[in-house]
Image: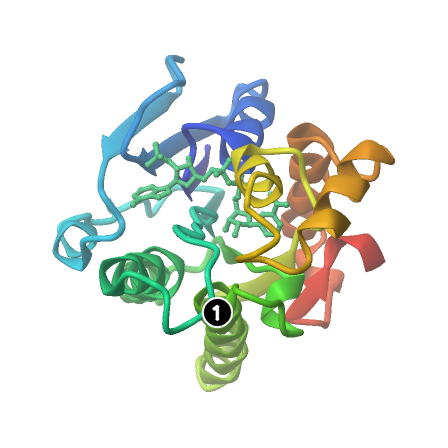
Amino acid sequence: MNYFFITGTSRGIGKALSEILLKKEDVKITGISRNCTIFHDNYEHIKLNLSNPEETKSFTFPTLEDAEEIVLINNAGVISEIKRIGQQKNENIINDYNVNIVSPSILSNNFIKTYQYYKNKRTILNISSGAGRHTVDAWSVYCASKTALDMFSENINIEQSFFPKENRIKIFSVAPGVIETAMQEQIRNTSEKDFSDVKKFVNLKNEGMLSSPNETAEKLLTVIENRDNLSDIISDIRNL
Ligand SMILES: NC(=O)c1ccc[n+]([C@@H]2O[C@H](COP(=O)([O-])OP(=O)(O)OC[C@H]3O[C@@H](n4cnc5c(N)ncnc54)[C@H](OP(=O)(O)O)[C@@H]3O)[C@@H](O)[C@H]2O)c1
């Protein structure tokens, strides 16, 4: 059996990842988000608010010694407010860092603590963003949290090299491109006064340049399938 722990499964990329995986008989998924929208015998939903680190800490990974493969996908991510620093609500800054980097760090820590000495295939896939690799007006917290996710992933990769080869856990931080999800809708609906690049995102949509959650999820899953042949920890699915 292959076990997947995926955050942000109620919609968008996380839901698409789950629905593709659930077509296979040998997959069990534990999905984490505030809302549950998937109902399947091989799907268990855990309602957690990832903006509350105390709730994230309460999640424990089960023992799965006979698993063929165990995967954690830190997919949940948010931009609460598209506004420049100085105009942001402090609560939203705390919320977004908690969802985008604090909770993924806690879940990764607990995943590695639980599974480090297993010998089966174990992978952490962090869903990053191109916005973690260049600046974007009015997205400072989002950009900084994704940069942190990239660096966190690179560090873990180095740390894993100190364990015997058979016990090492693979980690990747992948930018998924621009995808037609609720997040993009929110971005397009921001006023130009708050976000100087809004037209660029409206044009991407009008020119049919957005990927679907499904095609994005398919590509992200190839990262896990090809994990032993991929040398880059930080990547962009548009270049894979
Ligand atoms: N869409 C894009 O163009 C794009 C581009 C680059 C990177 N990304 C990244 O891709 C990932 C998925 O994005 P998406 O576009 O699929 O977003 P989305 O459609 O807005 O879905 C976000 C998911 O995260 C969950 N989530 C948000 N806040 C949460 C919280 N406090 N606690 C628990 N779960 C929470 C939501 O579930 P609930 O609301 O039910 O809790 C939802 O399932 C994110 O990390 C995003 O940064 C997206």
Q: Nearer the viewer, residue 190 or 3?
A: 190
Please identify the quadrant where the C terminus is shown.
bottom right
Q: Residue at x 80, y 42 (%)?
A: 203
- The answer to which quarter of the image holds residue 204 is top right
Q: Nearer the viewer, residue 24 or 80?
A: 80
- Asked if one can make out residue 60 in the rendered structure from this viewpoint, the answer is yes
Counting every numbered tag in the picture gives 1
Q: Please state if 40 lies on the left or on the right of 218 as rendered.
A: left
Residue 53 lies, in percent from the top left, at 19, 58
Residue 102 lies, in percent from the top left, at 30, 65
Identified by mark 1, the residue type is: Leu
Compared with residue 66, is residue 91 higher up or lower down, i.e. above or below? below
Q: Which residue is mark 1?
A: 149
Q: Residue at x 33, y 47 (%)?
A: 65
Q: Please state if 235 lies on the left or on the right of 123 as rendered.
A: right
Q: Residues within 10 Å of mark 1 (few under 14, many from 20)?
A: many
Q: Please state if 37 lies on the left or on the right of 27 as rendered.
A: left
Q: Please state if 66 lies on the left or on the right of 238 as rendered.
A: left
Q: Residue at x 81, y 53 (%)?
A: 238
Looking at the image, which residue sits at the far right? 207
Helix, strand or loop under label 1:
helix
Residue 117 lies, in percent from the top left, at 35, 66
